[in-house]
Image (cartoon, grey):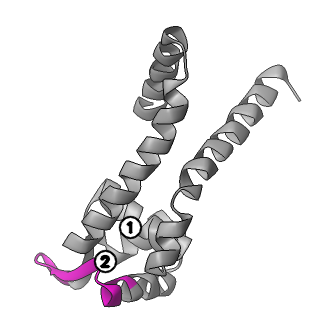
Amino acid sequence: MSERAAAIQRVLELERRSKARALRSQVGRLADENLTMHQFRTLALLGLDGEMPTTALAEALGAKAPVATGIVQRLVERGFVERADDPNDRRVHLVRLSKQGEEFLSDAFEEMDRVSSERIGALTDAQLAAYAEILEAFVTS
């Protein structure tokens, strides 16, 4: 394995560990609401990308349409998301966060940010500047 490939693998592993640490802060919240990780991921996608057709949501989840439809149905029943007909195409069903879903996700992201900010706050000014520059390059590429 080349030095670059090894560095990429190291970054991927560190990213997984960082995400896992942030997600661990949500385990209790998910259990309290009786939500699965797939349901949480669905809420997060809708929160980040906004309203979308069920087919686009399925693609974003890497799932088949019937699986995504089932996830959405359970979230509708729990009051976390809403379905609406696309005004331009009645065959298309749009999915969006409900007010309850927005509040839940906002609280979850706030807690994840708190956990991450504790770690980020421990960086030196130089490390923080480098980290911000790297993340900006990653997000905008």
As drawn, 84 above or below 141: below
Residue at numbered disc 2:
80
Quick check: is 84 in the magenta stretch?
Answer: yes
Task: Point out residue 34 in the picture as x, y percentages from the top left corner.
Answer: 48, 81
Mark 2 burial class by Cα count in 10 Å: few <14, some 14-19, many 20+:
many
Task: Point out residue 74 in the picture as x, y percentages from the top left corner.
Answer: 40, 88
Q: Which residues fall within the magenta stretch?
A: 75-90
* Direction from residue 117 to residue 97 in the image, left or right: left
Give the residue type that dot 2 points to.
Answer: Phe
Residue at numbered disc 1:
43
| 68 and 120: which is toward the camera | 120
As drawn, 11 above or below 47: above
Classify residue 141 by image quadrant: top left
Q: As drawn, which residue projects farthest toward the top?
A: 126
Give the residue type that dot 1 points to.
Answer: Leu
Mark 1 burial class by Cα count in 10 Å: few <14, some 14-19, many 20+:
many
Task: Name the residue rendered at 49%, 71% in the picture.
Answer: 30
Image quarter of the N terminus: top right
Name the disc covering residue 7, or none.
none
Q: Mark 1: which secondary structure?
A: helix
Task: Point out residue 126 in the picture as x, y percentages from the top left corner.
Answer: 52, 9
